[in-house]
Amino acid sequence: MTEPTRRSRSTEAFYGRRRGKSLKSAQADALARRLPELKLDLSTPAPLDLKSLWPDPVEEVRLEIGFGGGEHLLHRAAANPQAGFIGVEPFVNSMAKMLASLDADGLTNIRVYDDDATQVLDWLPDAVIDRIDLLYPDPWPKMKHWKRRFVSAVNLDRFARVLRPGGRFRFASDIDTYVNWTLTHIAAHPDFEWTAKTANDWREPWSGWPGTRYEAKAIREGRTPAYLEFVKSS
């Protein structure tokens, strides 16, 4: 009998459940109409000019992994019409909520993917992304699940490959063990440098930060968020 293939660290899913409560009618409608239109087609090679993914000209490309309800993604896309955004979110309810808001906002500079972000990272060409945002990712708090945290040596290798020289990786979390985990992995990686010079550089949000519902919940429950930014050094 052939043994089933064991999932490796580079292929293991980094997210939990895929679906929650029943969708509201507007959200279900937006999901049905806009997801097929905006979803990246990974069955075909990425375009040589990644900026051609958007209908209007863009000057830079940003990737947000696990955008939740889309508050940050929509805010940044509205504030930066010169940038093309790729938003990845496998949780159906969050994707539907964001697409419903996108319908109302009329933004045209967002593309999406509704599965594991590693699939997008492996599809992207080298050195095409200007910024990667990983904001309040699932901390997988139990030690036995730490291997499922998105920040890892193999995923930092992925980030380093797709980021342009000088590109930025931003990470936010209210879980101390995940913050320390991330700093430890960055320190061990040759292609990234932490940009912080003073404590305020990681205690205060970045310019233009809109806040998220996860952040608000963390503050209500007495946890202090950290905002880390790293630059690709080579």
Image: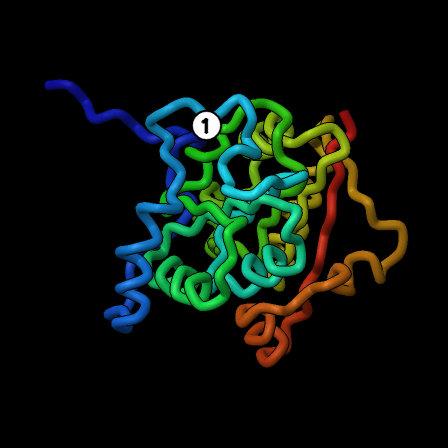
Please report the residue visible at 42 percent of the width from the left and 63 percent of the height from the top: 103
Q: Dividing the picture into quarters, in which one does residue 41 lie?
A: top left
Above or below for 216 versus 190: below
The residue furthest bottom is 220
Number of on-image labels:
1
Is 146 rendered above or below residue 208? above
- Foreground residue, 111 or 153? 111
Q: In this view, does 164 lie to the left or right of 66?
A: right
Residue visible at 89% across and 56% down? 198
Kindly identify which residue carries mark 1: 123
- Which residue of the protein is positioned furthest toward the top in this rendering? 1
Q: Where is residue 213 in the image (x, y as percent from the top left)?
A: 54, 72
Q: Name the one closer to the observer, 66 or 190.
A: 66
Question: Would you say 180 lies left or right of 102 here?
Answer: right
Is any part of residue 144 visible from this angle? Answer: no
The residue that appears at 42% across and 22% down in the rendered structure is: 45
Q: Which part of the image, by quadrant, shows the N terminus?
A: top left
Q: Where is residue 102 in the image (x, y as percent from the top left)?
A: 46, 61
Image coords of residue 158 (percent x, y) = 56, 29
View extreme (left): residue: 1
* Residue type, mark 1 in image: Trp
Badge 1: how crowded within 10 Å, few (<14), some, or many (20+)? Answer: some
Q: Looking at the figure, which quarter contains the C terminus?
A: top right
Q: Check the image and report above or below for 12 versus 157.
A: below
Residue 40 found in image quarter: top left
Rendering quarter of residue 148:
top left
Q: In this view, does 5 lie to the left or right of 16?
A: left
Q: Residue at x 78, y 37 (%)?
A: 193
